[in-house]
Amino acid sequence: MAEEQESAQRKAARMKMREALELFEGRHPERGVETMKDVLELDPDFIEPRKWLADHYADTGQDRLAISQYETMLRIEPDNDDLWDGLRAIDPRIADKLERLQHVAPDPFAAAGASVDTSDLDDFEDENDELDEDREAATPFQGDAAGDDVFLDDDTVDTAPYESLAWDHEQDPELRGALDSNSAFVDVMDGFMLLWQDSRTWSRMLVRCVPPNNANWPQLDPLLATAAAALEAPMPLTVVAPEHTPWPLCLPLQDETLVLGEPLRTALNQPELLFILGASLHLFLNDNAQYAWAAEQVIERKVDKPGLHDKVVETARDFTVGWDQALPREEVVRLSKLAHGWEQRAVLSADRAGLLVCADPPAACRAIAIMVGDPFNAPTVTVDGFLAQFKDIPRDELAAISLSRSPWTDPQYAAYRIQMLRWWATTADYKRLIGG
């Protein structure tokens, strides 16, 4: 299009782009880059400044940012061969994935506005669903394995047999195997692998975190070593964040990293902290952390108070773009419920690992209650007082939380976890493992 035929919006953006180029080529290259970003605020569909930014990012080793620009440009001009070649030069795998997604059939549910029938996934209850009064309550999820209907019928991928940990919840491997067999979930995992390898992103994300000694928490690493020895787990790098983390962040980076919020330093006593460390180390075993983060991304829960955890999930969206584009809406919902179901079992597995480390059931139960509340109220927390809030809810109904509520941090599910951990502490399996 000739410049005189351009819209007023495009003309203003082009003038801003000239200003950006002058700044970049002059004494203020950093301001030039920032001004080029401003061009896109004026005209988000303007390819030239996006291509300039993509080239700049690629030349300076910021491949993830370059890929993000190419992904946007290809949504604007999907038939532009030069853009496909540019993206393929940076990351052929991403280019192939986006090209494949470009040719999938449209989502018939989104097009037709059809309602979704999820009655075949009754194993995972929503908040307003009526519960079966005859459901087994003594050992929930046990002896009532998820039926075949929770496993999606989409394309499967070949995976190595999963060898469960000795303390895993009985249905944890079953549901994780279903996630392994779902190609869309595997796409999300692949996207996260790019995130874990992006050192620039993590240096920025964790800039406010400090080693335990610098946070006046010198006993943290020795306690972590004790927990690691008990589970025969590797020692991750440990850092302390100034904010509260409702659950420690287990980051499977090249150097595996555990992030704990500084308020936990005074909220937990030694046995309680050992429980939390043991439960966290569980996530570094058998790739559980990778699955936990991918499950969070699939479910897409909303939060009122974004923190470091939610910044990770938000950042990951750029790395997992397009995972659901090939799926009908019905299958996205079913995969979300499957991921949520696995999370519920995975939390129980992690609790068992923590109990094996601290070997103190009352301390483990109190730690769960503290972690789902305000850490500054920890001195007043008692397990019986915490459970009293849910005394009118039958035990089996405690477990029936909706997808919008995370089993890692939800108070109602925490009450269920406490009762399940108390029960597991009486079993022959626990006594055998703790004796060993």
Image (cartoon, rainbow, N blue to C red):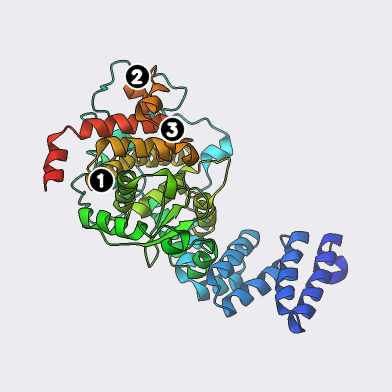
For disc 1, the marked residue is: 358
Asked whether residue 280 is in view, the answer is yes
In screen coordinates, is 89 left or right of 334?
Answer: right
In screen coordinates, is 124 left or right of 99?
Answer: left
Q: Nearer the viewer, mark 2 or mark 1?
A: 1
Q: Earlier in the sequence, mark 2 or mark 1?
A: 1
| Residue type at tag 1 | Cys
SS for callout 2:
loop
| Residue type at tag 3 | Thr
Q: Where is residue 188 shown, x and y percent of the image?
A: 43, 54
What number is the disc on residue 394? 2
Q: Nearer the viewer, mark 3 or mark 1?
A: 3
Asked whether residue 146 is in view, the answer is no
Q: Earlier in the sequence, mark 3 or mark 1?
A: 1
Q: Residue at x 46, y 63 (%)?
A: 214
Question: CA gap, disc 3 to disc 1?
Answer: 21 Å
Q: Residue at x 27, y 62 (%)?
A: 234
Question: CA gap, disc 2 to disc 3?
Answer: 25 Å
For disc 3, the marked residue is: 380
